[in-house]
Image (tube, coloured by chain):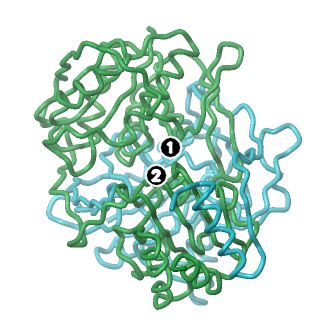
Chain colours: A green, B cyan
């Protein structure tokens, strides 16, 4: 048993299309890092309906081979279908390490897959290193207030999922790998849940991931009416308005504008956080941003730990002053 | 419908955390504890479902003696009875061993539905529910926003990424992990607090639930994270700070 296998998924809502989930290549980057550190070959697998086309795009990176895992019973995601399929792939490919992006879908099936093989997934890993020939995985506890080093014991396959933005895909080396179709043996009776159609709740979909500048508002805004000044700031910067979860839970802005682990993951040129303290669930959705700017009255707010620039002050004074300055 | 809700007691959200001398866990002597927030939403979902469909809600909790406070609070909110697997200390890190213990304790209960929060606020593995489902041989769904009973089982609304949702039909028995914030949490009433004192709490010892297996993962050290970025902060009068920030964004970061 040897090798590292990155298991990649397709983007949500693109069934039939062949767009990779945006975090997929980050998992491949993590797999490559493990492979390089331990001297192991790295392969990739793309799972889902229409995996072939996406697998071909992954084959343009320097990997040993790319498995295209497809079956008509994988047309809609189910934890049973994915677990049975990947269990068979793991048995056939025999990797020592299996690396996933820490997506909602992976959170739904990877712990089940690991359990089925008597293992525990090292979930939401932020960095990986090697100490004395053994892998050390760093993950966050207590909403990011504490870090922990994890180690695996015993025989693999060991399972790892990596946090959004923790590994960079832009450094992946180009190459040319064979694509191998892997058709698992699946029966309808193995799949116990029945997924229905995907839907969105709001009519106008906002793709925050395409925005170059995002101005995001949090609890500090106090009342729904006050959001207007943040909208004005976004307009002055030519950016999109976004929010942290409490704002959307209160119905002050639609869910589609939510950034964070339960909303969108964004990495704009500039992310300006207004009245957002910076809980880990929010940070994972935006920490890949090139420049982070924060406005908060609490100098100890965790958002300042990842901010490049910040203003410590009352947002109701600072935001109008910024708008005036930008309009000069 | 027999509904089991697995809950956990965690340090309060605003706790100031310190790592203990040998870096194995936090200094936990002086901390205040509360129910893991996502589990509070799982309990709420269970109570609402019982109000609609009838049946009972049983809470199960693994933790030291102090966890009995969190269990009493769940009973005061309306759970019918509880199971407390009393451990000597916090178990740091093997959700598979924990799930096997929960599964052993739940085997005689044969629940129709097992609910839990989607993750804990301390360890945050985000896996115990899914692992427990696999150990118990149950179908599952995660990040659930809404549950309704339908012919032959339940229909749940799952939250996916990028604003997508999906309804999934699941036969019972099943396990669900519940998303926070989808509904309002209830408070315990005075009557509820009074009645909680007389409700049954079954005490189990981990050794009664012995589960043979060597851990395949372990925490070797915990520590405070290093600050990775150097921030430029302005804290003067708003107009001056605004001018300085815009200058930096234009000419240093060059993002506007």
Task: Provide residue A169's location: percent of width, then percent of height.
Answer: 44, 33
Nearer the observer: mark 1 or 2; the answer is: 2
Residue A265, quarter of picture? bottom left
Q: Which residue is mark 2?
A: A267
Viewer-closest of B97 and B250? B250
Placement of the N terminus of chain A among the 4 image quadrants: top left
Residue found 42% across the figure and 66% down from its top: A258
In this picture, residue B50 sits left or right of residue A261: left
Task: Provide residue B224's location: percent of width, then percent of height.
Answer: 77, 46
Residue found 65% across the figure and 58% down from its top: A307
Report helix, strand or loop for mark 2. loop
In which chain is the residue bearing label 2?
A: A
Q: Does the CB distance between marks 1 and 2 fall below 8 Å?
A: yes
Task: Provide residue A142's location: percent of width, then percent of height.
Answer: 66, 54
Placement of the C terminus of chain A among the 4 image quadrants: bottom right
Q: Which residue is mark 1?
A: A165
| Whether residue A288 is situated above or below residue B164 in the rendered picture | above
């Amino acid at each position: 048993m040897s090798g590292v296998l990155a298991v990649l998924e397709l983007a949500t809502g693109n069934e039939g299309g062949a767009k990779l989930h945006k975090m997929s290549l980050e998992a491949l980057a993590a797999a490559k890092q493990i492979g390089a550190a331990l001297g192991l070959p790295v392969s990739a697998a793309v799972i889902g309906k229409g995996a072939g086309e996406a697998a071909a795009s992954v084959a343009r990176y320097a990997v040993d081979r790319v498995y295209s895992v497809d079956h008509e019973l994988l047309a809609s995601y189910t934890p049973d279908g994915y677990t049975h399929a990947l269990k068979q792939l793991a048995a056939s490919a025999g990797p020592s390490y299996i690396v996933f992006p820490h997506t909602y879908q992976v959170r739904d099936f990877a712990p089940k897959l690991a359990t089925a093989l008597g293992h525990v997934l090292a979930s939401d890993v932020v960095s990986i290193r090697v100490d004395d020939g053994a892998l050390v995985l760093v993950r966050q506890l207590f909403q990011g207030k504490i870090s922990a080093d994890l180690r695996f014991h015993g025989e693999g396959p060991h399972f790892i999922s990596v946090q959004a933005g923790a590994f960079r895909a832009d450094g992946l080396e180009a190459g040319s790998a064979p694509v191998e179709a892997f058709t698992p043996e699946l029966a309808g009776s193995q799949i116990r849940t029945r997924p229905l159609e995907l839907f969105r709740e709001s009519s106008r979909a906002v793709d925050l991931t395409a925005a170059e500048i995002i101005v995001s508002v949090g609890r500090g805004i106090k009342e729904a009416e006050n959001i207007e000044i943040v909208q004005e700031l976004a307009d002055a910067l030519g950016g999109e308005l976004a929010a942290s979860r409490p704002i959307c839970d209160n119905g002050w802005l639609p869910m589609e504008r939510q950034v964070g682990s339960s909303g969108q993951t964004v990495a704009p040129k500039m992310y300006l956080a207004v009245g957002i303290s910076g809980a880990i669930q929010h940070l994972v959705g935006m920490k890949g941003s090139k420049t982070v700017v924060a406005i908060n009255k609490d100098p100890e707010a965790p958002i300042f730990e990842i901010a490049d620039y910040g203003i410590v002050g009352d947002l109701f004074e600072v935001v109008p002053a910024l708008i005036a300055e930008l309009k000069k | 419908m027999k509904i089991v809700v697995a809950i956990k007691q965690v340090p309060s959200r605003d706790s100031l955390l310190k790592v203990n001398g040998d870096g194995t866990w936090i200094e936990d002597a002086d901390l205040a504890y509360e129910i893991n927030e996502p589990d509070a939403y799982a309990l709420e979902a269970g109570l609402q479902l019982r109000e609609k469909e009838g049946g009972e809600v049983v809470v199960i909790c693994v933790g030291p003696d102090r966890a009995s406070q969190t269990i009493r609070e769940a009973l005061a909110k309306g759970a019918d009875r509880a199971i407390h697997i009393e451990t000597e200390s916090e178990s740091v890190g093997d959700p598979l061993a924990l799930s096997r213990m929960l599964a052993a304790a739940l085997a005689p209960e044969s629940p129709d539905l097992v609910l839990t929060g989607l993750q804990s606020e301390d360890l945050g593995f985000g896996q115990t529910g899914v692992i427990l489902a696999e150990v118990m041989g149950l179908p599952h769904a995660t990040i659930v926003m809404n549950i309704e009973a339908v012919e032959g089982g339940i229909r749940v609304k799952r939250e996916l990424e990028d604003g997508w949702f999906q309804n999934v039909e699941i036969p019972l028995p099943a396990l669900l992990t519940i998303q926070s914030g989808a509904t309002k949490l209830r408070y315990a009433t005075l009557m509820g607090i009074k009645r909680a004192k007389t409700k049954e709490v079954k005490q189990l010892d981990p050794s009664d639930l012995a589960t043979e297996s060597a851990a395949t993962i372990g925490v070797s050290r915990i520590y405070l994270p290093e600050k990775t970025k150097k921030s430029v902060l302005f804290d003067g009068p708003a107009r001056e700070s605004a001018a300085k920030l815009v200058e930096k964004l234009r000419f240093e970061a060059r993002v506007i």
